Image (tube, rainbow, N blue to C red):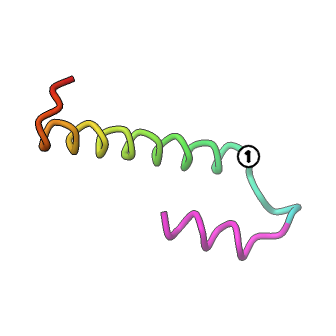
Amino acid sequence: MAWFFVYEVTSTKFSRDLFKELLVSLWSAIFLGFGVLFLMLWVGIYV
């Protein structure tokens, strides 16, 4: 996540790559989904 923030802040409008941004956002969404899943399992909400 920190890498994505640094990438967005330091890159210019012309040097950004849409594929790289989509790949990082997909990776982040997967990890966030697993985090929410295991948090719900931990507190007793069985999904």
Query: In the picture provided, is 35 more to the left or to the right than 26?
Result: left
14 to 36, vertically: above or below: below
**Residue 19 screen position, x and y as percent:** 68, 43
Q: Residue at x 31, y 42 (%)?
A: 36
Q: Which residue is drawn at 36% across and 45% down?
A: 31
Q: Position of residue 10 (x, y in %)?
A: 72, 76
Crowding at mark 1 (Cα within 10 Å: few <14, some 14-19, many 20+): few
Q: In this view, does 42 lie above or below 13?
A: above
Farthest residue, direction front: 44
Q: Nearer the viewer, residue 41 or 11?
A: 41
Q: Mark 1 points at which residue?
A: 18
Q: Quarter of the image holding residue 22? A: top right
Image position, residue 1 (x, y; %) = 48, 63
Q: Residue 34, image x and y in percent?
A: 30, 40
Residue sticking out furthest to the top: 47
Looking at the image, which residue is at 65% across and 50% down?
Answer: 21
Give the residue type at disc 1.
Leu
Label 1 SS? helix
**In front here: 28 or 39?**
39
- Quadrant including the C terminus: top left
18 vs 44, left or right, is: right
Q: Does the magenta stretch include residue 30?
A: no
Number of marks in the rendered image = 1
Q: Give the range drawn in magenta.
A: 1-12
Taking the spot 77% from the left edge, 58% from the top edge, the residue there is 16
Quadrant location of residue 9? bottom right
Q: 39 or 16: nearer the eye?
A: 39
Dominant secondary structure (helix, strand or loop) of the stretch shown in magenta: helix
